[in-house]
Amino acid sequence: MLVSVRQTDLANGTGSGFIEGCEAPISMQAVEQFICAGGQQHVVICPDGTINAIGSHDRLFNATQRRAISLRDGGCIIPGCSIPAAWHHDGGETETCNGVLLCWFHHHTIDTSGWQIMMIGGVPHVKPPPWLRGGRSDADTPWRRSTKSRTQQADLLQLSQLLVQ
Ligand SMILES: [Zn+2]
């Protein structure tokens, strides 16, 4: 089970967490009960979306990395996709900066769907296919950070609201 919670909320006992795959938030009390139940691994995801640290009690690094990537991406990173995501490793060294979450469909169509994926500073970014760019050229289409993690989406929303004010 994956529980997503902000580091600051956990430290202060405030706010709420999310069980990945469940719609409703859970209380911080429930989060603490999950932690006390033991066997937890602590993944720190920075405000900029990078995976900062993975606390591990064992040497099963691949399973740990899969959990970290699942927490960072929160689902298939293609915008608008709600198909449950499976692990996708995108070549190179088996490091969290090389892997992103994709569902089966987008995993198998990523070469033909027109979606582009690039890791920028350890964070997954996507660029839509030409027919979804509103007439903009490839060069004029910005890379957009993509995550389905609700804690990170909430943070991004707060960030954009701050920018608007
Ligand atoms: Zn997908």
Image: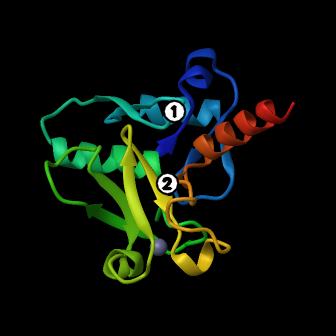
Residue indicated by mark 1: 48
Q: Earlier in the sequence, mark 2 or mark 1?
A: 1
Toward which corner of the image does residue 39 lie, by quadrant? top left
User: Residue 112: x percent and y percent?
Assistant: 36, 83
Q: Under tag 2, what secondary structure?
A: loop
Residue name at image x 32 percent, y 78 percent: 111
Vertical comparison of 50 with 106: above or below: above
Q: With 50 as the anchor, is 160 left or right in this view?
A: right
Q: With 37 as the anchor, is 74 left or right in this view?
A: right
- Crowding at dot 2, Cα within 10 Å, few <14 / some 14-19 / many 20+, comes out as many
Q: With 7 as the anchor, is 95 left or right in this view?
A: left
Residue name at image x 72 percent, y 42 percent: 157
> Which disc, if any, is residue 74?
2
Vertical comparison of 125 with 55: above or below: below
> Which disc, if any, is residue 110?
none
Query: Does residue 146 appear anywhere in the picture?
Result: no
Residues at marks 2 and 1, CA–CA distance in whole angstroms: 15 Å
Task: Give the amino acid type for the residue marked by disc 1 in the picture.
Answer: Asp
- Do the residues under discs 2 and 1 have CB atoms within 8 angstroms? no
Q: Nearer the viewer, residue 35 or 99?
A: 99
Q: Nearer the viewer, mark 2 or mark 1?
A: 1
User: Residue 116: x percent and y percent?
Assistant: 41, 66
Vertical comparison of 99 with 27: above or below: below
User: Residue 15: x percent and y percent?
Assistant: 70, 30
Q: How many marks?
A: 2
Q: In the displayed image of the protein, which residue is found farthest to the right? A: 165
Residue name at image x 40 percent, y 52 percent: 70
Query: Does residue 76 appear anywhere in the picture?
Result: yes
Toward which corner of the image does residue 8 lie, by quadrant? top right
Mark 1 Cβ and ligand 1 under 8 Å apart: no
Task: Give the amino acid type for the residue marked by disc 2 in the picture.
Answer: Gly
